[in-house]
Image (cartoon, rainbow, N blue to C red):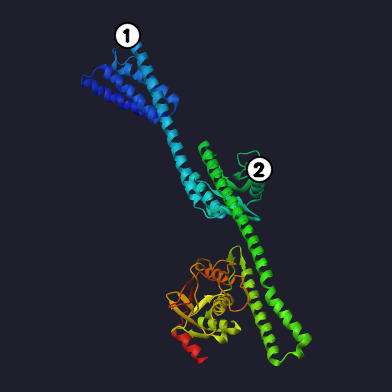
Amino acid sequence: MGILISISILTIETFAGFLFRLADFSVATIMALYILGVLISALVASARINNLLMSFASVIVYNFFFINPKYTLLAYDPDYPITFIVMFAVSFVGGTLTERLKNTAKAEARSSARTQVLLDTSRLLNRARDRKEVAALTGSQLHKLLDREVMFVLFENRNVMTYCYPASSESEFHTPLEQEAVQWTYRTRKESGAETEVYPGAYGHYFPVSINDNTYGVLGVIVGNTRLTQDNNDMLVSVLEESALMLENMRITVEKEEEKLKVKNEQFRANLLRSISHDLRTPLTSISGNASNLLQSGDNFDQKARNQMYLDIYDDSVWLDNLVENILAISRVEDGHMNLRLTTELLDDVITEALHHIDRRSKDYKITVQPAKDIILVQIDVHLIVQVIINIVNNAIKYTPPGSTITISSWKKKNTAFIRIADNGPGISAEDKPHIFEMFYNGNKKIADSRRSIGIGLALCQSIIKAHQGSIRASDNDPHGTVMTFSIPVREIEINEQQRMQDIDR
């Protein structure tokens, strides 16, 4: 192909030389024309032998057509042989330099393209959210870059995930020989398959995706009849190094988060056990003391004293029962996420159910419920939301004097339901307000009875509401008191006319 291009250039410049001759241009101008042709040929055709032949042919043709005697290879002027040698040397050196410049430009262009590809790949990998996405992006990107069938096998714990690009190539990678090559590369962290000495009969060439002492996967490339070029191989290795580095960083990040969570959980357990062991003593001592008095000297007490002892035992047991419910709810929080058992419920029924389980002393308070004008269906874990309402109402009873008013109202706005529990007690101090949702925070409030709160009720409420994609906040009531407001998602159910009539008939 290069020879044909050179012949074409030589023919065109010869024709141009004749035109220059008719225009009475000097032979030096025509010589420069042939030297220009050699440079153009060197730009178009890259073979060194082609440049040499073009330089030699230009001297011969120039001598044959334009040096007297014309149409022979003789020259009358004794200076012409030196001129021809100089012309050949200038043509060859110029062509060689042009060829080198062209090759250098190509190399720089390839290097720039490879750098840009690596930057783009790095940018994509940095956006990946997990290891699976890193594997998928790496396989997809290399498939586009190499224009070959690519497979990324990700080994994550005991799971093996395979990503093939295009998806239709999956059958080629899943022959017994290919799978053996993949497993060998993963174990040894060495290349295998086509173009290697290990499993050379395989369709694919397999590369380990590894860094330091960790191997995260194996990448396979179907070789076929065309071997990977050095540029392609260098680019592939660079992308795999970037992918392995990203997988390593993700592993380190996960380990650090797990360690932090482990320390946090240990601290939480220690605080919980310390608080529970301290705060269980008062009600348990009261229960055991009253029970002992009734068993040993019950007949010595009048009916009023006995009733008071029974009542104290009941109140303490209810307090313990509520504490156990809160602890059980906390136990459903795993790794910072609460496991919800969602069902669709009528909001008014949820509030009514919660009021059946509030503190016995609620009879000393004026508790009113202001239901929403519309029927509100909510998508919730009913047991947990009931616990939220119980905790907030019991807090209002606990921190406000008997005779106080507690108002529970609900309403819907767009796709969210709101529940507002307000009291007209002394309210929350500015000092305590920023901390009331912190675990084990008790503040400086005085409780109506002698029992101390262990400070998990509102913290648990916040965790439950956040798990429901809602929010909870505390504000001041006017003129005094506290308002607790939380939101939960609404469950929209469409009932067509036919269904409505069927329900009525039933």
- Hey, which quadrant is residue 453 in on the image? bottom right
Q: Residue 230 appears at what percent x and percent y? A: 53, 36
Name the mark nearer the viewer: 1 or 2.
2
Q: In which quarter of the image is residue 199?
A: top right
Q: What element carries label 1?
A: loop
Identify the residue shown where x is 33% and y is 22%. Answer: 35
Nearest the eye: 14 or 379: 379
Q: What residue type is labelled 1?
A: Asp
Most foreground residue, 59 or 457: 457
Q: In which quarter of the image is residue 383?
A: bottom right
**x and y percentages locating residue 32 in the rendered image:** 30, 20
Q: In this view, does 490 lie above or below 241?
A: below
What residue did someone put label 1 on?
79
| Mark 1, other Cα within 10 Å: few <14 / some 14–19 / many ≥20 | few
- The N terminus: image quadrant: top left
Task: Name which residue lies at 44% across and 40% down.
Answer: 113
The amino acid on which the numbered mark 2 sits, given as a three-letter code, is Tyr
Report the side of 447 relative to 102 (left or right). right
Using the image as rendered, state which of residue 283 and residue 31 is in the foreground: 283
Residue under label 2: 199
